[in-house]
């Protein structure tokens, strides 16, 4: 089953999990676009960006919070 990144993002946000989208490929940043770089120049970087999300990770996270994040991700993608 293929789940879209924005569906995963929305569902995890609805569960109170503060996820983010990071690592926009540098060649897609406006400065580099102005230098002539375009979508398709680095397909592996673009593929990673289309699929990746950043989940909460910080030293004060409790085991309970970690378990909640993991179980929520499993619920959403499985």
Image (spheres, rainbow, N blue to C red):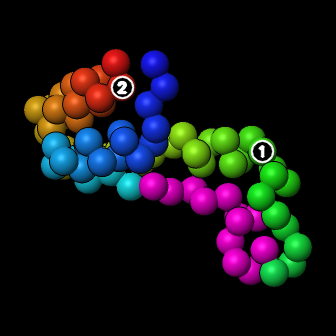
Q: Earlier in the sequence, mark 1 or mark 2?
A: 1
Q: Is residue 71 toward the left or the right of residue 49 in the image?
A: left
In percent of width and height, residue 18 lies at 26, 53
Neighbor class of circle 1 (other Cα within 10 Å; few <14, some 14-19, many 20+) is few
Callout 2 secondary element: helix
Give the extent of the magenta segment.
21-33
Image position, residue 31 (x, y; %): 74, 80
Q: Position of residue 36 (x, y in %)?
A: 88, 73
Q: Which residue is mark 1?
A: 43
In-image side of 34 versus 7 (left or right): right
- Which label sits on residue 30? none
Residue at 34% across, 18% down: 78
Q: Which residue is mark 2?
A: 77
> In this view of the protein, can residue 7 be seen by the observer?
yes
What is the C-alpha distance between the residues marked 1 and 2? 24 Å
Disc 1 element: helix
Q: Position of residue 27 (x, y in %)?
A: 76, 64
Is 27 left, or right, of 6 in this rendering?
Answer: right
As drawn, is 14 to the left or to the right of 3? left
Q: Quadrant of residue 12?
A: top left
| Residue at figure coordinates x 71%, y 65% from the top left | 28
Q: Is residue 35 above or below residue 71?
A: below
Residue located at (29% from left, 29% from top): 76
Q: State yes or no: residue 22 in magenta.
A: yes
């Amino acid at each position: 089953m293929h789940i879209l990144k924005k569906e995963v993002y929305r569902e995890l946000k609805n569960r109170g999990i503060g996820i983010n989208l990071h690592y926009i490929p540098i060649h897609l940043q406006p400065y580099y676009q102005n230098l002539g770089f375009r979508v398709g120049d680095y397909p592996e970087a673009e593929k990673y960006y289309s699929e990746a999300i950043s989940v909460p990770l910080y030293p004060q996270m409790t085991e309970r919070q970690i378990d909640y994040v993991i179980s929520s991700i499993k619920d959403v993608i499985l």
